[in-house]
Image (cartoon, rainbow, N blue to C red):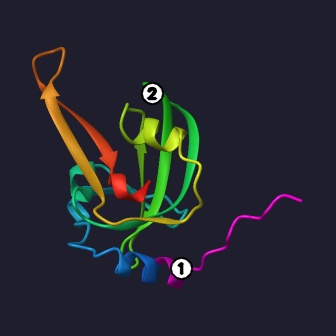
Amino acid sequence: MVDQPKRVTALDAVRMAQAARQKGELATADLAEYDGDGFWLVKNKMALVGKGFVVLSTEYGVGEWGDQVTVTGVTNTGKAFKFNDGSTGVYKQLSSYTGEFPFAANNGLRVSEYDGPTGRTARTFYLDDSAL
């Protein structure tokens, strides 16, 4: 018999996020539209750097630039959000993740900046390593 995924209530998720040492909140300016599924789309992932949250679920698909993962999460104040990533960072980390959901990303995202192929600064985002 296959184990069923653990069901998590919104209150449970908020409690987990509070325990994740949340260091700030998502500003409205960092969010895009609220598309009716209960999650705000994060348009600036820098808003999640160093800010703990709980990863509720992931969904894999194909986006404008290829394979990607949509990550849904919640902050300690109960703000439900989602973001997309198709990089060698979050996408690659979660593609090989075999643990359970939800889980706390205690320090949120971290970012690696480098010179991109066009000469502009490029960024790759990673989940806090201790979460995985």
Q: CA distance from mark 1 to mark 2?
A: 31 Å
Residue that numbered label 1 is attached to: 10
**Residue 44 appears in view:** no
**5 vs 99, nearest the viewer:** 99
Type of the residue with mark 1: Ala
Where residue 127 sits: x, y (%)? 35, 50
Where residue 22 sits: x, y (%)? 27, 74
Q: Where's the N terminus, which quadrant? A: bottom right
As drawn, is 114 to the left or to the right of 75? left
The secondary structure that dominates the magenta segment is loop
- Closer to the chain start, of discs 1 and 2, is 1
As drawn, is 99 to the left or to the right of 27? right
Where residue 128 sits: x, y (%)? 32, 54
Magenta segment boundaries in residue numbering: 1-13
Where is 10 relative to 44, above or below? Answer: below
Where residue 36 sits: x, y (%)? 53, 63
Q: Which mark is residue 64?
A: 2
Residue drawn at x 67%, y 70% is: 6
Residue placed furthest toward the top: 117
Q: How many neighbours does mark 1 have within 10 angstroms: few (below 14), some (14-19), or many (20 or more)?
A: few
Type of the residue with mark 2: Glu
Residue drawn at x 37%, y 31% is: 88
Give the label, 1 or 2, closer to the camera.
1
